Image (cartoon, rainbow, N blue to C red):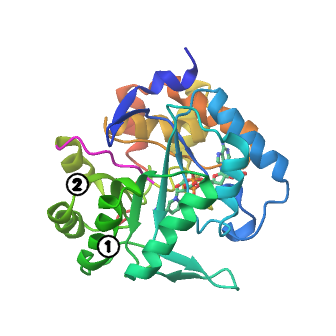
Amino acid sequence: MSSVDQSGTFLLGDRSVKRLGYGAMQLAGPGVFGPPKDRGAALAVLREAISNGVNHIDTSDFYGPHITNEIIREALHPYPKDLVIVTKISARRGKDASWIPAFSREELTQAVHDNLRNLGLDVLEVVNLRAMFDIHGPAEGSIEAPLTAVAELQRKGLVRHIGLSNVTPAQISEGRRICKIVCVQNSYNLAQRGDDAMIDGLARDGIPYVPFFPLGGFNPLQSSALSNVAKRLGATPMQVALAWLLRRAPNILLIPGTSSVAHLRENLAAAGLQLADDAMKELDTIISAGPA
Ligand SMILES: NC(=O)c1ccc[n+]([C@@H]2O[C@H](COP(=O)([O-])OP(=O)(O)OC[C@H]3O[C@@H](n4cnc5c(N)ncnc54)[C@H](OP(=O)(O)O)[C@@H]3O)[C@@H](O)[C@H]2O)c1
Protein backbone atom coordinates (compact mmCIF):
# COMPACT_ATOMS: atom_id res chain seq x y z
CA MET A 1 0.00 0.00 0.00
CA SER A 2 1.44 3.39 -0.97
CA SER A 3 1.26 6.18 1.60
CA VAL A 4 -1.33 7.98 -0.55
CA ASP A 5 -3.70 5.02 -0.04
CA GLN A 6 -3.78 5.88 3.66
CA SER A 7 -5.63 9.09 2.84
CA GLY A 8 -8.73 7.03 1.98
CA THR A 9 -11.00 7.54 -1.00
CA PHE A 10 -14.05 9.60 -1.94
CA LEU A 11 -16.37 9.63 -4.94
CA LEU A 12 -15.65 12.41 -7.46
CA GLY A 13 -18.40 12.29 -10.07
CA ASP A 14 -18.69 8.54 -10.50
CA ARG A 15 -14.99 7.80 -9.94
CA SER A 16 -13.36 6.85 -6.67
CA VAL A 17 -10.24 8.95 -6.07
CA LYS A 18 -7.70 8.94 -3.30
CA ARG A 19 -8.21 11.92 -1.00
CA LEU A 20 -4.61 13.07 -1.45
CA GLY A 21 -4.04 14.19 -5.03
CA TYR A 22 -1.90 16.77 -6.80
CA GLY A 23 -2.44 20.31 -8.14
CA ALA A 24 -0.41 21.12 -11.27
CA MET A 25 -0.49 24.93 -11.18
CA GLN A 26 3.08 25.24 -9.87
CA LEU A 27 4.47 23.47 -12.95
CA ALA A 28 4.29 26.55 -15.19
CA GLY A 29 6.82 29.39 -15.04
CA PRO A 30 6.86 32.18 -12.44
CA GLY A 31 3.44 33.76 -11.94
CA VAL A 32 1.90 30.63 -13.54
CA PHE A 33 3.02 32.10 -16.87
CA GLY A 34 5.32 30.75 -19.55
CA PRO A 35 7.42 27.60 -19.40
CA PRO A 36 9.02 26.24 -16.22
CA LYS A 37 12.73 26.80 -15.66
CA ASP A 38 13.28 23.04 -15.82
CA ARG A 39 10.78 21.11 -17.95
CA GLY A 40 12.42 17.80 -17.05
CA ALA A 41 11.81 18.51 -13.37
CA ALA A 42 8.14 19.26 -14.07
CA LEU A 43 7.75 15.97 -15.94
CA ALA A 44 9.47 14.17 -13.05
CA VAL A 45 7.04 15.61 -10.48
CA LEU A 46 4.03 14.31 -12.41
CA ARG A 47 5.53 10.86 -12.94
CA GLU A 48 6.51 10.66 -9.28
CA ALA A 49 2.95 11.54 -8.25
CA ILE A 50 1.52 8.72 -10.35
CA SER A 51 4.13 6.21 -9.22
CA ASN A 52 3.20 7.07 -5.61
CA GLY A 53 -0.44 6.22 -6.30
CA VAL A 54 -1.96 9.67 -6.97
CA ASN A 55 -5.07 9.33 -9.16
CA HIS A 56 -6.49 12.85 -9.01
CA ILE A 57 -4.72 15.75 -10.73
CA ASP A 58 -6.04 19.30 -10.89
CA THR A 59 -5.10 21.58 -13.78
CA SER A 60 -6.26 24.29 -16.14
CA ASP A 61 -5.41 25.33 -19.66
CA PHE A 62 -4.89 28.87 -18.38
CA TYR A 63 -1.80 27.69 -16.44
CA GLY A 64 1.01 28.74 -18.75
CA PRO A 65 -1.35 29.18 -20.67
CA HIS A 66 -1.51 25.72 -22.30
CA ILE A 67 1.94 24.76 -21.01
CA THR A 68 0.90 22.89 -17.86
CA ASN A 69 -1.56 20.74 -19.80
CA GLU A 70 1.06 20.05 -22.47
CA ILE A 71 3.48 18.93 -19.75
CA ILE A 72 0.82 16.67 -18.20
CA ARG A 73 0.23 15.10 -21.61
CA GLU A 74 3.94 14.61 -22.28
CA ALA A 75 4.54 13.10 -18.84
CA LEU A 76 1.53 10.83 -18.51
CA HIS A 77 -0.25 10.16 -21.83
CA PRO A 78 -1.61 7.52 -22.40
CA TYR A 79 -3.11 8.08 -18.98
CA PRO A 80 -3.50 5.40 -16.33
CA LYS A 81 -7.10 4.10 -16.33
CA ASP A 82 -7.79 5.22 -12.77
CA LEU A 83 -6.47 8.78 -13.22
CA VAL A 84 -9.04 11.57 -12.94
CA ILE A 85 -7.86 14.88 -14.43
CA VAL A 86 -9.96 17.84 -13.34
CA THR A 87 -9.65 21.11 -15.22
CA LYS A 88 -11.18 24.55 -14.88
CA ILE A 89 -12.35 27.18 -17.35
CA SER A 90 -13.47 30.82 -17.48
CA ALA A 91 -10.26 32.82 -17.69
CA ARG A 92 -7.63 33.58 -20.28
CA ARG A 93 -4.22 35.15 -19.92
CA GLY A 94 -3.10 38.52 -21.19
CA LYS A 95 0.33 39.01 -22.77
CA ASP A 96 1.35 40.63 -19.48
CA ALA A 97 0.39 37.44 -17.53
CA SER A 98 -2.87 39.03 -16.32
CA TRP A 99 -5.96 36.87 -15.66
CA ILE A 100 -8.86 37.98 -17.84
CA PRO A 101 -12.42 36.69 -17.31
CA ALA A 102 -13.54 34.54 -20.27
CA PHE A 103 -17.09 33.72 -19.29
CA SER A 104 -18.98 33.93 -22.61
CA ARG A 105 -20.43 30.83 -24.31
CA GLU A 106 -17.84 31.15 -27.10
CA GLU A 107 -14.91 31.51 -24.71
CA LEU A 108 -16.07 28.58 -22.54
CA THR A 109 -16.51 26.38 -25.62
CA GLN A 110 -13.05 27.36 -26.84
CA ALA A 111 -11.59 26.59 -23.40
CA VAL A 112 -13.09 23.09 -23.39
CA HIS A 113 -11.62 22.41 -26.85
CA ASP A 114 -8.23 23.82 -25.77
CA ASN A 115 -8.20 21.51 -22.73
CA LEU A 116 -9.17 18.48 -24.85
CA ARG A 117 -6.44 19.19 -27.41
CA ASN A 118 -3.65 20.00 -24.99
CA LEU A 119 -4.42 17.11 -22.63
CA GLY A 120 -4.96 14.70 -25.55
CA LEU A 121 -8.44 13.63 -24.44
CA ASP A 122 -11.79 13.04 -26.21
CA VAL A 123 -13.79 13.95 -23.13
CA LEU A 124 -12.92 15.92 -19.99
CA GLU A 125 -13.75 13.97 -16.81
CA VAL A 126 -14.55 17.01 -14.63
CA VAL A 127 -14.67 20.67 -15.65
CA ASN A 128 -14.92 23.31 -12.94
CA LEU A 129 -16.58 26.55 -13.96
CA ARG A 130 -14.65 29.23 -12.05
CA ALA A 131 -16.78 32.26 -11.19
CA MET A 132 -14.99 35.47 -12.17
CA PHE A 133 -17.12 38.27 -10.65
CA ASP A 134 -14.06 38.90 -8.48
CA ILE A 135 -10.92 37.16 -9.65
CA HIS A 136 -9.49 36.95 -6.15
CA GLY A 137 -12.41 35.46 -4.26
CA PRO A 138 -16.09 34.50 -4.34
CA ALA A 139 -18.46 37.36 -5.17
CA GLU A 140 -22.19 37.29 -5.85
CA GLY A 141 -23.56 37.23 -9.40
CA SER A 142 -25.65 34.79 -11.42
CA ILE A 143 -23.79 31.87 -13.00
CA GLU A 144 -26.84 30.75 -14.95
CA ALA A 145 -25.65 31.78 -18.43
CA PRO A 146 -22.10 30.35 -18.27
CA LEU A 147 -23.18 27.20 -16.44
CA THR A 148 -25.94 26.56 -18.98
CA ALA A 149 -23.27 26.81 -21.69
CA VAL A 150 -21.08 24.24 -19.92
CA ALA A 151 -24.10 21.95 -19.42
CA GLU A 152 -24.67 22.08 -23.19
CA LEU A 153 -21.06 20.99 -23.75
CA GLN A 154 -21.76 18.14 -21.33
CA ARG A 155 -24.83 17.11 -23.36
CA LYS A 156 -22.62 17.11 -26.47
CA GLY A 157 -20.35 14.58 -24.73
CA LEU A 158 -17.27 16.81 -24.36
CA VAL A 159 -17.52 17.04 -20.57
CA ARG A 160 -18.48 14.17 -18.25
CA HIS A 161 -19.02 16.03 -14.96
CA ILE A 162 -19.30 19.66 -13.88
CA GLY A 163 -17.96 21.38 -10.76
CA LEU A 164 -17.78 24.96 -9.53
CA SER A 165 -14.90 27.08 -8.28
CA ASN A 166 -14.52 30.42 -6.50
CA VAL A 167 -18.21 30.39 -5.61
CA THR A 168 -20.59 31.51 -2.87
CA PRO A 169 -23.25 29.29 -1.24
CA ALA A 170 -25.93 31.09 -3.32
CA GLN A 171 -24.06 30.24 -6.53
CA ILE A 172 -23.79 26.58 -5.49
CA SER A 173 -27.57 26.49 -4.93
CA GLU A 174 -28.18 28.20 -8.26
CA GLY A 175 -25.77 25.80 -9.98
CA ARG A 176 -27.43 22.71 -8.52
CA ARG A 177 -30.76 23.85 -9.96
CA ILE A 178 -29.17 23.97 -13.44
CA CYS A 179 -27.14 20.75 -13.50
CA LYS A 180 -25.50 18.16 -11.28
CA ILE A 181 -22.51 19.68 -9.47
CA VAL A 182 -19.92 17.05 -8.53
CA CYS A 183 -17.38 19.18 -6.64
CA VAL A 184 -16.63 22.65 -5.34
CA GLN A 185 -13.12 24.16 -5.41
CA ASN A 186 -12.54 27.23 -3.23
CA SER A 187 -9.67 28.69 -1.25
CA TYR A 188 -9.46 27.10 2.23
CA ASN A 189 -6.76 26.03 4.65
CA LEU A 190 -5.81 25.90 8.32
CA ALA A 191 -5.61 29.69 8.52
CA GLN A 192 -8.45 30.59 6.18
CA ARG A 193 -11.66 28.86 7.13
CA GLY A 194 -14.41 31.02 5.67
CA ASP A 195 -16.03 27.99 4.00
CA ASP A 196 -16.58 25.92 7.15
CA ALA A 197 -20.38 25.87 6.85
CA MET A 198 -20.18 25.22 3.09
CA ILE A 199 -17.91 22.20 3.64
CA ASP A 200 -20.29 20.69 6.18
CA GLY A 201 -23.29 21.26 3.90
CA LEU A 202 -21.55 19.64 0.93
CA ALA A 203 -20.44 16.72 3.14
CA ARG A 204 -24.10 16.07 4.04
CA ASP A 205 -24.85 15.80 0.30
CA GLY A 206 -21.77 13.68 -0.49
CA ILE A 207 -20.20 16.39 -2.68
CA PRO A 208 -16.40 16.78 -2.57
CA TYR A 209 -14.92 20.08 -1.44
CA VAL A 210 -11.46 20.61 -2.95
CA PRO A 211 -9.55 23.40 -1.21
CA PHE A 212 -7.13 25.34 -3.34
CA PHE A 213 -4.19 26.95 -1.52
CA PRO A 214 -4.25 24.04 0.99
CA LEU A 215 -0.71 24.98 2.03
CA GLY A 216 -1.36 28.72 1.89
CA GLY A 217 -0.70 29.17 -1.84
CA PHE A 218 2.14 31.36 -3.05
CA ASN A 219 3.13 32.13 0.55
CA PRO A 220 3.03 28.78 2.34
CA LEU A 221 1.55 28.82 5.88
CA GLN A 222 3.78 29.82 8.75
CA SER A 223 2.70 29.77 12.38
CA SER A 224 4.23 28.84 15.70
CA ALA A 225 1.30 26.53 16.56
CA LEU A 226 1.82 24.70 13.28
CA SER A 227 5.57 24.40 13.85
CA ASN A 228 5.04 23.22 17.46
CA VAL A 229 2.60 20.47 16.49
CA ALA A 230 4.85 19.41 13.61
CA LYS A 231 7.89 19.21 15.88
CA ARG A 232 6.02 17.13 18.45
CA LEU A 233 4.89 14.67 15.79
CA GLY A 234 8.22 14.49 13.98
CA ALA A 235 6.50 15.83 10.86
CA THR A 236 6.87 18.99 8.78
CA PRO A 237 4.49 21.97 9.03
CA MET A 238 3.21 21.32 5.49
CA GLN A 239 2.41 17.70 6.38
CA VAL A 240 0.47 18.85 9.44
CA ALA A 241 -1.46 21.39 7.35
CA LEU A 242 -2.50 18.60 4.97
CA ALA A 243 -3.28 16.10 7.75
CA TRP A 244 -5.51 18.74 9.37
CA LEU A 245 -7.50 19.08 6.14
CA LEU A 246 -7.82 15.30 5.79
CA ARG A 247 -9.24 15.11 9.29
CA ARG A 248 -11.39 18.25 8.94
CA ALA A 249 -14.10 16.54 6.82
CA PRO A 250 -14.41 13.29 4.86
CA ASN A 251 -15.44 15.08 1.65
CA ILE A 252 -12.23 17.16 1.48
CA LEU A 253 -9.99 16.13 -1.43
CA LEU A 254 -6.46 17.54 -1.43
CA ILE A 255 -4.56 18.93 -4.42
CA PRO A 256 -1.40 20.47 -2.90
CA GLY A 257 0.80 22.04 -5.56
CA THR A 258 4.55 21.81 -5.91
CA SER A 259 7.23 22.01 -8.56
CA SER A 260 9.60 19.86 -6.52
CA VAL A 261 9.84 16.07 -6.26
CA ALA A 262 11.15 16.38 -2.69
CA HIS A 263 8.18 18.53 -1.63
CA LEU A 264 5.80 16.19 -3.45
CA ARG A 265 7.11 13.16 -1.52
CA GLU A 266 6.87 15.12 1.72
CA ASN A 267 3.28 16.15 0.97
CA LEU A 268 2.13 12.67 -0.05
CA ALA A 269 3.56 11.22 3.16
CA ALA A 270 1.01 13.36 5.06
CA ALA A 271 -1.58 10.71 4.18
CA GLY A 272 -0.21 8.57 6.99
CA LEU A 273 -0.11 11.33 9.61
CA GLN A 274 -2.82 11.10 12.29
CA LEU A 275 -3.64 14.21 14.30
CA ALA A 276 -4.96 13.61 17.81
CA ASP A 277 -7.63 15.85 19.38
CA ASP A 278 -5.10 17.92 21.33
CA ALA A 279 -3.20 18.73 18.11
CA MET A 280 -6.46 19.69 16.37
CA LYS A 281 -7.28 21.99 19.30
CA GLU A 282 -3.88 23.66 19.18
CA LEU A 283 -4.22 24.16 15.43
CA ASP A 284 -7.61 25.81 15.99
CA THR A 285 -5.71 28.80 17.40
CA ILE A 286 -4.57 29.61 13.85
CA ILE A 287 -7.70 31.23 12.50
CA SER A 288 -7.86 34.44 10.55
CA ALA A 289 -11.50 35.40 10.28
CA GLY A 290 -13.11 36.41 7.02
CA PRO A 291 -14.46 34.83 3.85
CA ALA A 292 -12.30 32.43 1.86
N1 LIG B 1 -9.75 27.13 -8.54
C1 LIG B 1 -8.85 28.08 -8.42
O1 LIG B 1 -9.14 29.24 -8.58
C2 LIG B 1 -7.44 27.74 -8.05
C3 LIG B 1 -6.58 28.75 -7.64
C4 LIG B 1 -5.28 28.39 -7.26
C5 LIG B 1 -4.88 27.07 -7.31
N2 LIG B 1 -5.75 26.10 -7.73
C6 LIG B 1 -5.35 24.67 -7.74
O2 LIG B 1 -5.03 24.31 -6.41
C7 LIG B 1 -3.73 23.69 -6.37
C8 LIG B 1 -3.07 23.96 -5.03
O3 LIG B 1 -2.85 25.34 -4.87
P1 LIG B 1 -1.42 26.01 -5.00
O4 LIG B 1 -0.49 25.08 -5.69
O5 LIG B 1 -1.61 27.34 -5.58
O6 LIG B 1 -1.01 26.26 -3.50
P2 LIG B 1 -0.58 25.32 -2.28
O7 LIG B 1 -0.75 23.89 -2.64
O8 LIG B 1 -1.28 25.84 -1.09
O9 LIG B 1 0.94 25.69 -2.10
C9 LIG B 1 1.87 25.67 -3.12
C10 LIG B 1 3.10 26.40 -2.64
O10 LIG B 1 3.66 25.69 -1.54
C11 LIG B 1 4.99 25.30 -1.84
N3 LIG B 1 5.14 23.95 -1.29
C12 LIG B 1 4.50 22.83 -1.66
N4 LIG B 1 4.88 21.79 -0.90
C13 LIG B 1 5.78 22.26 -0.02
C14 LIG B 1 6.53 21.67 1.01
N5 LIG B 1 6.41 20.36 1.32
N6 LIG B 1 7.37 22.46 1.73
C15 LIG B 1 7.51 23.77 1.45
N7 LIG B 1 6.82 24.40 0.47
C16 LIG B 1 5.96 23.64 -0.26
C17 LIG B 1 5.12 25.34 -3.33
O11 LIG B 1 6.44 25.65 -3.71
P3 LIG B 1 7.39 24.53 -4.43
O12 LIG B 1 6.95 24.48 -5.85
O13 LIG B 1 8.75 25.09 -4.23
O14 LIG B 1 7.18 23.25 -3.69
C18 LIG B 1 4.18 26.50 -3.66
O15 LIG B 1 4.85 27.73 -3.49
C19 LIG B 1 -3.02 24.32 -7.57
O16 LIG B 1 -1.87 23.58 -7.94
C20 LIG B 1 -4.12 24.36 -8.59
O17 LIG B 1 -4.24 23.10 -9.22
C21 LIG B 1 -7.03 26.42 -8.09
Q: Nearer the viewer, residue 207 or 233?
A: 207
The residue carrying mark 2 is 180
Residue 195 sits above or below residue 9 on the image: below
User: Residue 229: x, y in percent?
Assistant: 52, 34
Please tell me whether mark 1 or mark 2 is closer to you in this view.
Answer: 1
- Tell me which numbered mark, 1 or 2, is placed earlier along the sequence: 1
Secondary structure predominantly adopted by residues drawn in magenta:
loop
From the viewer's perspective, is 148 left or right of 95?
left
Task: Give, as a single range, the part of the protein colored magenta.
Answer: 205-211
Determine the secondary structure under disc 2. Answer: loop
Q: Residues within 10 Å of mark 2 (few under 14, many from 20)?
A: few
Residue 207 sits inside the magenta stretch: yes
Q: Quadrant of residue 51?
A: top right
- x and y percent of residue 185 in the render? 39, 56
155 vs 80, left or right, is: left
Q: Residue at x 70, y 85 (%)?
A: 95
Q: Nearer the viewer, residue 280 or 142?
A: 142
Residue on which the image places disc 1: 149
Task: Give the amino acid type for the residue marked by disc 1 in the picture.
Answer: Ala
Residue 38, given in percent of the width and then of the height, sits at 85, 54
Q: Is mark 1 within 8 Å of ligand 1?
A: no
Q: Is residue 211 above or below residue 9?
A: below
Image position of 36 with respect to 234: above or below: below
